[in-house]
Image (spheres, rainbow, N blue to C red):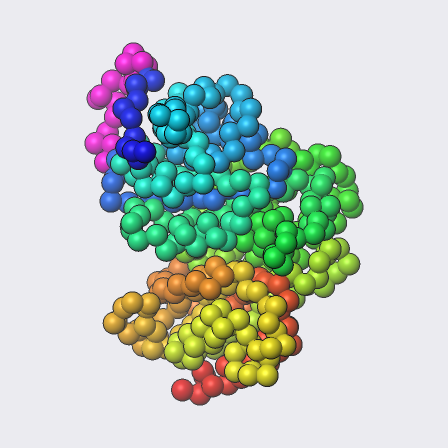
Amino acid sequence: MSDAIPDLIDVFEPALLPPSPQVSTEQLDDSMDKDKAVPATILTGYLGSGKTTLLNYILTEEHGKRIAVIMNEFGDSQGIDQAFTTVDNGEMVEEWLDLKNGCLCCTVKDKGLKAIESLMERKGKFDYILLETTGLADPGKIASMLWSNEELGSDIRLDGIVTMVDAKNVERQLAERPPDGETMNEAQKQLAFADRILLNKSDLLEGEALSDIEATVREINGTARVERTSYAKVDLNAILNIGAYADVGPDSLPFSGSQHGHHHIDARIRTMALGAPHRLCWSVVDEWIQELLWDSRVPGDDASAQANSEMEILRLKALLLTTDFVPVGGDESFGAATVVVQGVREMYDSFVVPDKEVASEEAGAMAGLYKLVLIGREMPEQALRDSWARLLSRAMAR
């Protein structure tokens, strides 16, 4: 089956296009910049959470954004020509469809990355990529594939994971038994990996009931921004180009400490933060992260390897002050640098951010801005805190 994209008929009438003098060269250069990495957002959510309603809005309304949407569940989306696939000798062939509001759309069957590779041949006709997953997908695995795909190179950048939540039914979904061989169910994973959480169908709950649901969500994932929505109505600026894998503003790590409450259904899945108020030797921190993610054990605690065999680190985020930082795969060393670390399961990356983008060292330390945040399952909190304390002692001494 050929991966080539067929030529499509332009759906715009020439009379509807503005005369060329009204379009500045600067605007054209900016919109057609093929050297700029396109932000790719993963949209996930349990069945019935409202993803189709959100996609209907994106693909049919005049919102002014050029979004390439890759849909894994087409359903009964209204107002859109459903002839996205053709049959060639009995095989399904994906086709891209130009929509009247400037968006692109296609449906795929388990070939999301291949669709993105083909999509990049049309680079310049869209500004965002939105990859919808199936309701039973693990967004962490998809994020890892996007992150590590060398063929896509610098064409795209993983922007964030947006999770739709059915506020009315999420407690039941979180309590469902995991599939055979799994330690978590799909709803738990989708919340844990999220960078933005849309608490949809909020209009079906009132007062304390809605607050309790939001508390449950926040205890699983204390770093994601939560938006209450009804009928999936949301400002697209809140879910697109959010820079969740690069952002270093004060909102990047809003989680300020352990949260304990009576709302959480499964207390084994939670968020915890480890403060880093001083400048640290990067090599010591790097070794600590590697042992945690790659060996799945509390760093420096040999006795914990067997005891914590069920520990899973799903997401790691950090903003740290470092010395002697060397980027992954690089040979340049930074004597003193502010560093962002982003991790998904066993994969992680680290990079320097300009000091002007974050608070001063003293102000940031006083505000608790510099920290390492973990989202995971079966995390032995006290053992991890003790291990981190030992790291702080060693890393500051060098």
Q: Is residue 18 above or below residue 122?
A: above
Q: Quadrant of the N terminus?
A: top left
In the rendered image, residue 51, in percent from the top left (x then y), is placed at 56, 35
Q: Front-most of 169 and 320?
A: 169
Q: Residue at x 47, y 70 (%)?
A: 294
Is residue 24 highlighted in magenta? yes
Q: Residue 280 lies in what quarter of the image? A: bottom left
Residue 304 in sight: yes
Left or right of 181? Residue 68 is left
Q: Residue 219 lies in what quarter of the image? A: bottom right
Q: Quadrant of the C terminus?
A: bottom left
Residue 30 in sight: no
Q: Front-most of 267 and 230?
A: 267
Left or right of 396? Residue 355 is left
Q: Front-most of 229 and 268?
A: 268
Q: Residue furthest front?
A: 89
Q: How many marks?
A: 0
Q: Residue at x 52, y 82 (%)?
A: 300
Q: Residue at x 35, y 65 (%)?
A: 352
Is residue 373 highlighted in magenta? no
In the rendered image, residue 249, in percent from the top left (x then y), is placed at 46, 57
Q: Residue at x 31, y 48 (%)?
A: 152
Q: Residue furthest top?
A: 15
Q: Is residue 9 above or below residue 184?
A: above
Looking at the rendering, the stretch of residues picked out in magenta corresponds to 13-29
Q: Residue furthest bottom?
A: 397
In the rendered image, residue 34, in percent from the top left (x then y), is placed at 25, 40
Q: Is residue 212 above or below residue 109?
A: below
In the rendered image, residue 396, in percent from the top left (x then y), is placed at 45, 83
Decide whether the magenta segment is chiefly helix, strand or loop: helix
